[in-house]
Amino acid sequence: MNVRCLFFALLLLVTPSPAYAEALVTALSTERVSIESNFTGSGVVIFGTVERDQQTVARGDPYEIVVTLTGPLRAMVARRKERTAGIWINRTSSELPRVPSFLAIATTAPMTDVAGNPVRARQGLGFDMLPTRGLPDAIPPVRTDFDAAFFRLMQKEGLFSLNEGSVEFLSPQLFRAPIALPSNVPIGWYTATVYLFSGGVLLAKTTQDFSILKGGFEQAITNLAHRQPALYGLATVVVACFTGWLAGVAFRKD
């Protein structure tokens, strides 16, 4: 038994360790986006660099980057209107139990050129590979008419976007990916995920979180209502009484 253990120990020592693969180092231009009453949209930029160890063999294919910005996951319902007795009403529906409320995708090249369908399906990359009723799988998801309608409406509202070729390499290793945030962007915690591909193979992946929250006077009122409801109620009564008194003075007839 001891001889066998010694043999395996020596085998591990003489076996060469595998070469280190590429690594991604990424950063966000901001960690929080504040939404106030005059908010008309904003943006976030993801910066990154590809680090290679000296032992890493140079690759024949260029690096490709895919960046996804995913909003809070929610359950949504897609409904189909049908004409009944001359009136258009909702008749059939389908629930999408786990879909992002916001999704922006930016790439260095067309998505189909970055990686094949099995690779993209396992990562849920692309509108055609994004799962709506489960987790990502090696098999592309089956789409229904309700799924197609959901994706079409989300893109029409600017909540889903695909910008192929918008990721720019500033140097052989340094890249930037600008992503626009529309005025109707949902609040909550977001995840920025960066994928590094070469020759259709996923080499590295990083994730970072940031928040989109209300700010300014509106957020102060919301915080007061949730944290100190008694004080919020008293302040509301005082403001209502003052407003009524002021209106009576302004419109009083002599």
Image (cartoon, rainbow, N blue to C red):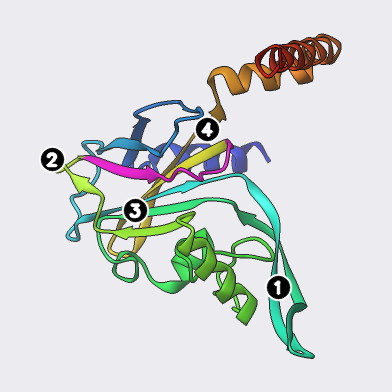
Q: Amino acid at mark 1?
A: Arg
The quarter in which the C terminus is drawn is: top right
**Of helix, strand and loop, which one carries label 2?**
loop
Q: Which residue is mark 4?
A: 212
First in sequence: mark 2 vs mark 4: 2
Q: Amino acid at mark 3?
A: Ala
Q: Is residue 144 visible?
A: no
What label does residue 171 carry, if any? 2
Q: Is residue 137 magenta?
A: no
Front position among marks 3 and 2: 3
Which residue does the image show at 69% across and 79% down from the upper left? 81
**Of helix, strand and loop, which one carries label 3?**
strand
Front position among marks 2 and 4: 4
Residue 5 image point, x, y percent: 61, 39
What label does residue 79 carry, if any? 1
Residue 225 image point, x, y percent: 76, 19
Check if mark 1's residue and mark 2's residue have beta carbons within 8 Å.
Answer: no
Residue 221 image point, x, y percent: 67, 18
First in sequence: mark 3 vs mark 1: 1
Cα–Cα span, label 3 and label 2 = 18 Å
Q: Amino acid at mark 2?
A: Ser
First in sequence: mark 4 vs mark 3: 3
**Extreme residue toward the front, this view:** 254
What label does residue 48 carry, if any? none
